[in-house]
Image (cartoon, grey):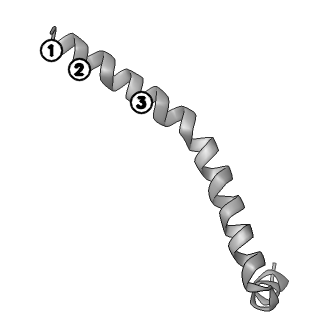
Amino acid sequence: MFAAPFGWLFLDERLKVLMLAGIALVLFSSLLPSWNELARRFKRTAAKTNPD
């Protein structure tokens, strides 16, 4: 636990960017299905209130 910040300091810049990109990709892919479900639900309720 204490070694992680020190290891982070000694990492190469490109490796840091690569790791951050990987973490962001994992977070984005895990959040995407819930966002799609929310958008679908929002569209459904909007269609109910606005019957165009």
Give the alpha-carbon distance from disc 3 to disc 1, as whole Å: 18 Å
Check disc 2 and report the residue beneath it: 46
Give the alpha-carbon distance from disc 3 to disc 2, as whole Å: 12 Å
Residue located at (68% from left, 60% from top)? 23
State the quadrant of the N terminus: bottom right
Give the alpha-carbon distance from disc 1 to disc 2, as whole Å: 6 Å
Amino acid under disc 3: Leu
Element type where label 3 sits in the image? helix
- Mark identifier at residue 9: none
Amino acid under disc 2: Ala
Q: Nearer the viewer, residue 21 or 2?
A: 21
Q: Are marks 1 and 2 in contact (CB under 8 Å)?
A: yes
Q: Quadrant of residue 6?
A: bottom right
Q: Are marks 3 and 2 in contact (CB under 8 Å)?
A: no
Q: Are marks 3 and 1 in contact (CB under 8 Å)?
A: no
Determine crowd level at label 2: few under 14, some 14-19, many 20+ residues with C-alpha closer than 10 A: few
Looking at the picture, does residue 9 appear above or below residue 15?
below
Check disc 3 and report the residue beneath it: 38
Looking at the picture, does residue 29 appear above or below residue 22?
above
Check disc 1 and report the residue beneath it: 50
Element type where label 1 sits in the image? loop
Residue located at (42% from left, 30% from top)? 38
Q: Quadrant of residue 45?
A: top left
Residue located at (47% from left, 27% from top)? 37
Find the residue positioned furthest to the front: 14
Is 40 placed left or right of 34 in the picture? Answer: left
Q: Nearer the viewer, residue 17 or 2?
A: 17
Question: Which callout, 3 or 1, points at the residue further toward the start of the chain?
Answer: 3
